[in-house]
Amino acid sequence: MSTVPSLAIVGARIRTLDPARPFASAVAIRDGVFVAVGDDATIRAACDGSTEIVDGSRLAIVPGLTDSHIHPIWGVMSTRGANLTQAHTIDDLRAALAAERERVGPNEWILGWGTLYEPFKRTGIRADLFEDVLGGQPCYAGFFDGHTGVASNAALAAAGVSGPVEFGETSAVVCDPDGTPTGELQESGAMNLVKGVIPQPSDEAFYRMVADQFRRFNAVGLTGLHGMDGSPDDFDFLRKMEANGDLTCRLVLPFWQKPHDAFDGMHAQLPLRDERDRRWRAGVAKFFLDGVIDSGTAWLLEPDTKGDCTEPFWPDPQRYSDAVALFAGAGFQCATHCVGDAAVRWALDTYKAAGAAPGIRHRIEHIEQLDDADLPRFAAENVVASMQPLHMGYFEADRSDSWCVRVGPERMHRTFRSGELRASGATVALGSDWMVATYDPRIGMAFARQRRPAGAPEWPPMLPDQALTAVETLEGYTTQAARTVSEENVAGKIAPGYRADLTAFAADPVEVAPDDLPNLPVLLTAVDGEIVFQAEA
């Protein structure tokens, strides 16, 4: 068998994140792995006429970036229609929905995504604030965090919703005192009532939407994704994508477990733990233990300033613990959405009781509030902190936004404690939670480093002492991401024997000022040594 590299990059500036050789100028790749890392002369000597040699003189290469919390398939479906992320007032919202009505034409559904809470600060979330611009057409607008939606009268009627609904989880069709729905839908059970009747694209159109989105991920430097929604029903779709050459990012696919799911169904998933192909794999069980602070559905140790955030998403949290024990006992990694500090504590206690298979690290997602007593437990109990500092971009500079108001100033020191978690020795993996926030890791890295939006020096940083260093931030998208899914010996570094996933920028992202990171050009992205994105010269 030939050992001659099939691809080599020479003349580059390479930050390997491998302590044995932190920097290099050339790499050689064969069969999807790095076979040599070193200087130009050494790598050229290993090549022959069959090797494709890439001039890397313009390239600053780092290990391929991984988004450790993203919704790559659900996000595609959830970002249809009008982009409402810049609709800061009711008038803005009305104008955007009216424009979307013009675009789609009569008798069609009007969809929106990225809705903010701020326009409803004084009125509460109500569809009657914009009903008159819809012309009687059904409308559904999802909020930026994926935990709230607002539906028009016609949309509620299409779903058969005319009053309160009982759910097997903490969800709600919010109603006025007379039982008339306001249009606000809290959490997945309520939102899915309406989302279930929205017309869906054809299989062919949906496939193309997802494949195109994966290419957009590559264009910002992403090579790997830790998906946060999925089921065994996705296997055939992923196999088709891989067979067609359209699975251009690695994907970890979780099985989402819901409070009302029968344990028989959970048992049926256990034999599927090791389902995989070259670029995707199963083996993760995903849980939601609470909602979000903005809507009062997070689970805090003390109520928020409005008296909310007191209940878990699973009405019986012990049932969640039993489900975790089932999957952990079968060798799955468990990932739990925990925004509030009470949810974090329950998850930590649950993981400690359930144990983990050798080499497996359970993980907690978001950790927006964290009590002092629980911070050291992540490192001590080998639990991954999966965080998205860029979510703080939804805060107002004066902290008048709904998140900060509900938390209150006395608890702000518990907010997104990524710096302290990393200093404690915990694994801190970074991601976007797209479609909640942009999937562009350059923007995510900038926020992690300075705790404020890039290019906005007037915006006061949120707890600047919790900022990560430039190297720690890059590690959050590389080595720490690999450690999260127990792949630290095959991924996250540029070293012989490691997967040949790399991201090439115009300059080293560690050396670029955080305010300049969003505009740092991505020049090349490779997965398995296959160039999946290359900027035009």
Image (cartoon, rainbow, N blue to C red):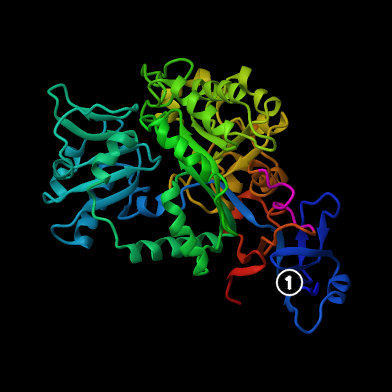
Quarter residue 195 falls in: top left
Residue at x 51% of width, y 17% of height? 410
Q: Which residue is mark 1?
A: 56
The residue that appears at 35% across and 30% down in the rendered structure is 260
State the residue in front, 244 or 484: 244
Q: Residue at x 68, y 48 (%)?
A: 474
Percent position (x, y) of residue 365?
53, 35
Is residue 9 within the magenta segment? Answer: no
- In the image, is 342 to the left or to the right of 314? right
Residue closest to the eye, 413 or 308: 308
Q: Residue 468's spot in the image, x, y percent? A: 67, 39
Horizontal side, residue 422 vs residue 332: left or right: right
Residue 61 higher or lower than 477, as above or below: below
Q: Is residue 422 above or below residue 281?
A: above
Residue 396 in view (yes/no): no
What element does badge 1 sit on?
loop
> Is residue 286 placed above or below 73 in the rendered structure?
above
Q: Quadrant of residue 21?
A: bottom right
Image location of residue 343, percent across then percent down: 49, 24
Q: Nearer the viewer, residue 28 or 505?
A: 28
Q: Which residues are magenta?
A: 486-495
Q: Residues within 10 Å of mark 1 (few under 14, many from 20)?
A: many
> In the figure, is residue 365 to the left or right of 38?
left
Q: Foreground residue, 209 or 242?
A: 242
